[in-house]
Image (spheres, rainbow, N blue to C red):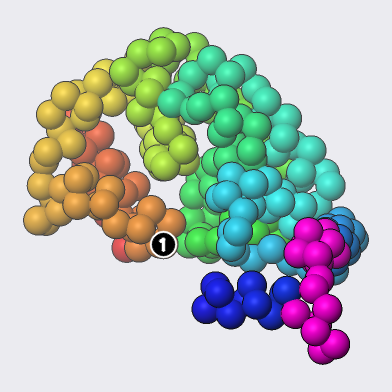
Amino acid sequence: MFNESVMAVEMMEDGDSVSLKKLMEEKFHTISSSIESIGRDVDRGTISLDYPTQRSEGQWEKQVITHASSDVARIVKRIANSDWFEDNGKYTPSSRNNGTINRIVMESIMVINYLDEWKKKPEDMGIFLKTKNDKKCFYHFEEILKELDGVVESESVISNMFDPKNSFVLFALFDKFKKLGLESVHFVKFLSAFQCSLHEHSIEGVTWGMLNKKSPKDKAIVMGKINYLEVLMMDYLGLEHQTRS
């Protein structure tokens, strides 16, 4: 196949030899023009990037925020640039720059306020939050981050539990914890116990390891993780828990 392609490039109908370099330059120019055209369409919003395809996941996620309203987008970016994400969590420099933190913020807003209406795709979250346009949800999440920032030590084992995969689940758990009226230090103690051994506990035949191996964005798994952690936390604190179906 490769040899046949080379022969086709080297021969014209009149039998004259054609410069491979010249043809490749012309081909490159055509492809570049097409890419520029697609880029303009994306900027105008006439093309929606629904899947990563040739892009890295992080680059794709950076586009997701464009599905939200300008007001919501500004708040998401402000939260993503807050001290919490700068000083805490297991976030790489690239995750702070490629839109991953924006995704985490939107996921957190969804699970804390709209768990029953959870959206698996980030772009669907952007559209949903644009429709809701409830800034109080974002202000509440900022307060959660401020409280956590005061009790979670930077670069600690507990801090590193807040990674791109499960941060939004832990933020939702802390929101539930705050409704108990207990001091935040007890939440940190629970996370320490969970990291040490509680994660191995089986609840109705399910362990954290089993849940964590599943697709992290499926609604059933998201709700399963939150229920699992809440059951463990309430048991650790000596309180009763009502399972959410």
Q: Is residue 105 visible?
A: no
Q: Image quadrant for the C terminus?
A: bottom left
> Which of these two is toward me, 111 or 195?
195
- Look at the image and give the residue range highlighted in magenta: 11-27
- Magenta includes 18? yes
> Which of these two is toward me, 226 or 120?
120
- On the picture, is 8 further left or further right than 118? right
Q: Taking 114 as reference, is 184 above or below it?
A: above
Q: Amino acid at mark 1?
A: Lys
In the rendered image, residue 192, in percent from the top left (x then y), is placed at: 24, 21
- On the picture, is 4 further left or further right than 127? left
- Magenta includes 114? no
In the rendered image, residue 243, in percent from the top left (x then y), is placed at: 27, 54
> Which of these two is toward me, 155 or 42?
42
- Residue at x 83% of width, y 78% of height: 16
Q: Taking 31 as reference, is 98 above or below it?
A: above
Q: Secondary structure at mark 1?
A: helix
In the rendered image, residue 123, in percent from the top left (x then y), is placed at: 65, 59
> Which of these two is toward me, 239 or 77?
77
- Residue at x 35% of width, y 28% of height: 161
Q: Taking 218 as reference, is 112 above or below it?
A: above
In the rendered image, residue 114, in percent from the top left (x then y), is placed at: 54, 55
- Residue at x 64% of width, y 66% of height: 50
Give the residue at mark 1.
219
Question: Image quadrant of residue 23?
Answer: bottom right
Neighbour class for label 1 at 10 Å: few (<14), some, many (≥20)?
some
